[in-house]
Amino acid sequence: MNYDYSKLKGKIRELGITQNEYARYIGITEQSLILRFKNKRRFRQEEMQKTMELFDEPIKNVHIYFFTQKVQKNRTN
């Protein structure tokens, strides 16, 4: 299952921090973050928890940033 991390990326930009700064904050490298954004690796619970603390949002909102499924576009020929 692939997830859409556009809201997560948008919130990071909204806070005025770089992806590298965000990665360091949650305890991973920028390369590992990129792999997560590409759905090559999954975010761990600790990383999600730190993210919600950084965003100053309740954990109940975690689904907004981490569990939005990518919607496949229909192709017509």
Image: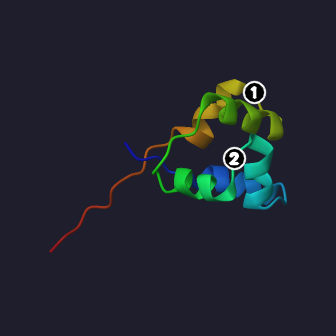
Q: Please provide percent x and percent y for residue 7.
A: 63, 51
Which element carries disc 2, helix, strand or loop?
Answer: loop
Q: Please provide percent x and percent y for residue 10.
A: 69, 57
- Residue under label 2, please give it: 28
Q: Mark 2: few, some, or many residues within 10 Å (few <14, many ≥20)?
A: some
Q: Residue furthest bottom?
A: 77
Which element carries disc 1, helix, strand or loop?
Answer: loop
Between marks 2 and 1 in the image, the one whose residue lies nearer the viewer: 2
Which residue occupies 23% across, 67% down? 75
Q: Please provide percent x and percent y for residue 58.
A: 75, 27
Which residue occupies 45% across, 51% down? 40
**As rendered, which of 31 and 39 lies closer to the eye?**
31
Q: Does 45 sit above or below residue 8?
A: above
User: Which quadrant holds residue 48?
Assistant: top right
Q: Mark 1: few, some, or many residues within 10 Å (few <14, many ≥20)?
A: few
Q: Please provide percent x and percent y for residue 8.
A: 65, 49
Query: What quarter of the picture does the N terminus occupy?
Result: top left
Residue 58: which numbered mark, if any?
1
